[in-house]
Image: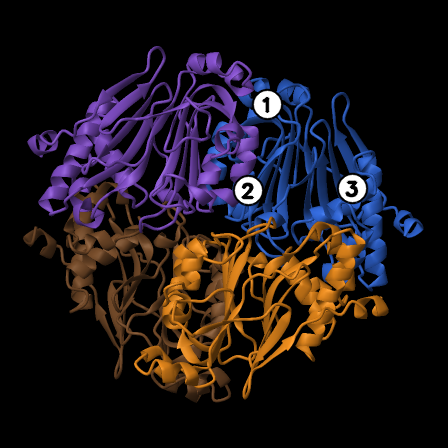
Chain colours: A purple, B brown, C orange, D blue
Amino acid sequence: MCRWLAYSGSPVLLDELLYGTQNSLIVQSLHSRLGAEETNGDGVGVGWYGAQETPAVFRSIEPAWNDRNLRELADHISAGTVFAHIRASTGSPVQQTNCHPFRHGRWLWMHNGLIRDFHAVKRDLVLAVDPDLYPEIEGTTDSETLFYVALTFGLEDDPPRAVERAIGLVEAAGREHGVEYPFQGTIATTDGESIWAFRYSSEGKSRSLFFSTDVRTLRAVYPENEMLRELSDEARLVVSEPLGDLPGAWNEVPESSWGVVKPGQDELHAFTPDLEFAGAHR
Amino acid sequence: MCRWLAYSGSPVLLDELLYGTQNSLIVQSLHSRLGAEETNGDGVGVGWYGAQETPAVFRSIEPAWNDRNLRELADHISAGTVFAHIRASTGSPVQQTNCHPFRHGRWLWMHNGLIRDFHAVKRDLVLAVDPDLYPEIEGTTDSETLFYVALTFGLEDDPPRAVERAIGLVEAAGREHGVEYPFQGTIATTDGESIWAFRYSSEGKSRSLFFSTDVRTLRAVYPENEMLRELSDEARLVVSEPLGDLPGAWNEVPESSWGVVKPGQDELHAFTPDLEFAGAHR
Amino acid sequence: MCRWLAYSGSPVLLDELLYGTQNSLIVQSLHSRLGAEETNGDGVGVGWYGAQETPAVFRSIEPAWNDRNLRELADHISAGTVFAHIRASTGSPVQQTNCHPFRHGRWLWMHNGLIRDFHAVKRDLVLAVDPDLYPEIEGTTDSETLFYVALTFGLEDDPPRAVERAIGLVEAAGREHGVEYPFQGTIATTDGESIWAFRYSSEGKSRSLFFSTDVRTLRAVYPENEMLRELSDEARLVVSEPLGDLPGAWNEVPESSWGVVKPGQDELHAFTPDLEFAGAHR
Amino acid sequence: MCRWLAYSGSPVLLDELLYGTQNSLIVQSLHSRLGAEETNGDGVGVGWYGAQETPAVFRSIEPAWNDRNLRELADHISAGTVFAHIRASTGSPVQQTNCHPFRHGRWLWMHNGLIRDFHAVKRDLVLAVDPDLYPEIEGTTDSETLFYVALTFGLEDDPPRAVERAIGLVEAAGREHGVEYPFQGTIATTDGESIWAFRYSSEGKSRSLFFSTDVRTLRAVYPENEMLRELSDEARLVVSEPLGDLPGAWNEVPESSWGVVKPGQDELHAFTPDLEFAGAHR
């Protein structure tokens, strides 16, 4: 229902991240290989960190494949932390405020998947949002609401814990309304320093998610590859689906897990929704 | 912060309503005479009743003065009940879901003005909305939230009473949050048969609102006027500001009042927000 | 590279034409079965004839599948002659002025296919356009330029002859610039009374084109079919690809031919580009 | 009919150029003081030079005052050569390809004003465009056509001479068609190193144009002014109207003149259309 890409590493031109590969995000906007929908033409968004404290976010309702402003930005902007997202709406309106990534202060958030029967549980989720944060919600997606629930539950202090709590609330609220599998999807969030990625679904069959192999390892295998030589040792991509067919370059994120890309050793852990937290704090 | 027009009468081409007068709504989009803002370029919407049970609604984020699809529709569509609205955003995003008129079933709703400090009271208002109606809210304006509060409070059964209750809640919630003058504006709503219009503000200095003089009276004064001869006896316009300078054609709606345009004798009454209702039903 | 639909018959709600079938034009915008491109998401246009002398044209750059204004119009407008087109750009910008159908007076025009190497021959074609018509060209597509060449060559008097001359010029100009197969595609044009449709390509492998079987014949085969009972005897659809799977309902237009849907007996003829005309009149 | 701004100097955040002053370009989009039209809400464009060979161009059809992507870019992008333009259409469609600045290779071009009776002379001007350049024209404005005429007449080698020739052709073609005052306006063009600005009209009453006073001079007068201290000595703004009210900061460009902002001493010269060139080369 969407596809996304998160990058952390030495600054690269957005063009290389968005257009420069065989199965690039722009290619996926017309023909995704692994997505729930082949076409992801309901808007596009890119967030990046530059000289300012908060990240820039460009969002457009035009299909990514023909968005000329996106093409211009990609040709001229380089960044070391980049989020990009192409949307396939599951019903909510195609408007800039429904395009990912969403931003709060230094934080970005994007999501592929859905909260099932969102109409039924939306009110419960919105009620859980900190009243001071509530007016910041500008769009109508399940993804943005989930972001604000996670912010309310401590995203800025402990992202994995906050997301476990937020999805725990989705699971609990969904079950109350008789939804069999309340949550489906993958999530990425960042403060500009680290990137946290999540893969989880109530039914245990989550949307696809991959991370790139360590650059030093890949360089040893492909000593001639120019792009690999330019990348920093710690450069990492987390993507809905592989951007190309280089053998050994892509690794599937296991079901029900979360990982963090950060200075030093990256990590991968099991993910378990916290069904208690929200109930205990109502 | 916006301008609007409501028409009921014999079917007329939208062109005549929207473009065909000296100070038409399209002229007002660039140069409003009486509006809080001179420019109303943040989108446009038109609702009309045709052969179907529910009205059609066209909404666009382009400024009305250069919207070509609006121009096309105006040239080709005639209707006997028409709502049209041009927007000057007070901060909420320029997107179709924030353009008036809003629709629920057979009902249309539009508003000129604002709920002051909406960020502070939005949550209280949203909590008052019937949970079954809540998921229908698609945009982020104060106007749409107020519509759903009014629907919750009985708009479809007794529009004047429901709006008195809804604005009563705005007054009460605003005061709780220390807002001196919580509500400002004019509202129009219709079920396709009758049009109800409201003019009220907490401070007693409301946005301008006018209604057209009885067609039979005008015809007697201007026997040569071709447009007047074509209109049905009961045709009536309610508008944010006069569409032209014909002496005797326009009458100001008094402060704190509501009126109804309906088959038979139209009516005009005093408007008093009901501060008790919402509190008693929480 | 595009898909289109032309309808003539008893007035029907646009919804039935655009959304109401298994392989409707809206379905084709995401997943065309027979198109050169599977996705036709670069804008949409609908033209219809109502009470006015000239047809109405609605054009939007949003993908058809999620265009809410199109959805509204389809739900509320009925017409007896309708052109609808979904676009897959071959490079020219996605903007309303590049959306089909194009209009000149009472005439509409739409096209699926391309003038190959249009950049090379555009100037030659534009030079052939009547200087009085030239300033009316508002977009940058090959299709619109071809429309104005055809108008210059007599479209309003003898459509088949004018299109044979216009495509003749494309063939001649293309060959001068070394283009092997200068023209590819299908065209529909109408004055609101009759619809002319063309299928031709230099290489003899043209984009798909179908016409619907005579309604009386279909009714005899499917006496229970409700839609068929509502249609007038002479109702006819010409479409880039069948809208459904009803056996016997669709007939392929032969290679290199043109047809006319008109009051009385429709006709089908061979199509031969006139390579002489333009040269003789330069 | 438009307003524009050209900056050359030490890199500054776009925000300071576009939003940061009392009568900023964004303020002018709603309320221009000296423009032919008060409202310039028919689109916006910004061009800037970064690390790449060719400049970036962002163009949007939304009114500048509420364009969120423009706001984002302004908050995050700094540049040393910047062109920005807000549009008030004189009839041609509101679409990205009609937004200034226009680009060819390293060159940018923008214009405020009009070629009078453009419909009558457009064909003559287009015929003068180098056939190799012709297919690059993507929009339908007089401004873009004039850019391609100037490119044809040597803009990249000698900008003042090329513009004198191009406007000379406009004057000649206009007179042939009986246009009393064929050209009106101001123009800016740049190769990223120097900026050339032009002020001219057939009737000798041209659209307003100003340049900023030498930074060293201003600093001596306003030693406390922080922005002035940050700017490089050679920083210069050329603008349709002053961005603020600082006494001594703005100087009107004389009628019928052109200037160049470049490394070293800037220059100001008389401008005379070359009426002979185009005729001699037809």
Q: Are marks 2 and 3 on the same chain?
A: no
Is residue B6 visible in the rendered image? The answer is no
Give the spatial CA distance, label 1 vs label 3.
Answer: 28 Å
Is D19 situated left or right of D253 in this image? left
Give the number of callouts: 3
Q: Secondary structure at mark 2?
A: helix
Q: Amino acid at mark 1?
A: Pro
Q: Which residue is mark 3?
A: D151
- Of mark 1 and mark 3, the one earlier in the sequence is 1
Is B76 situated left or right of D40 in this image? left
- Measured from the top left, where is residue D84 in percent x and y? 60, 38
Residue B15 vs residue C247, the one in the foreground:
C247
Q: Chain of mark 1?
A: D
Any mark on residue C45, and which?
none
Q: Quadrant of residue C220?
A: bottom left
Q: Amino acid at mark 2?
A: Arg
Any mark on residue A68, and which?
2
Q: Nearer the viewer, mark 2 or mark 1?
A: 2
Q: Amino acid at mark 3?
A: Leu
Q: Chain of mark 2?
A: A
Residue D254 vs residue A201, the one in the foreground:
A201
Q: Which residue is mark 1?
A: D11
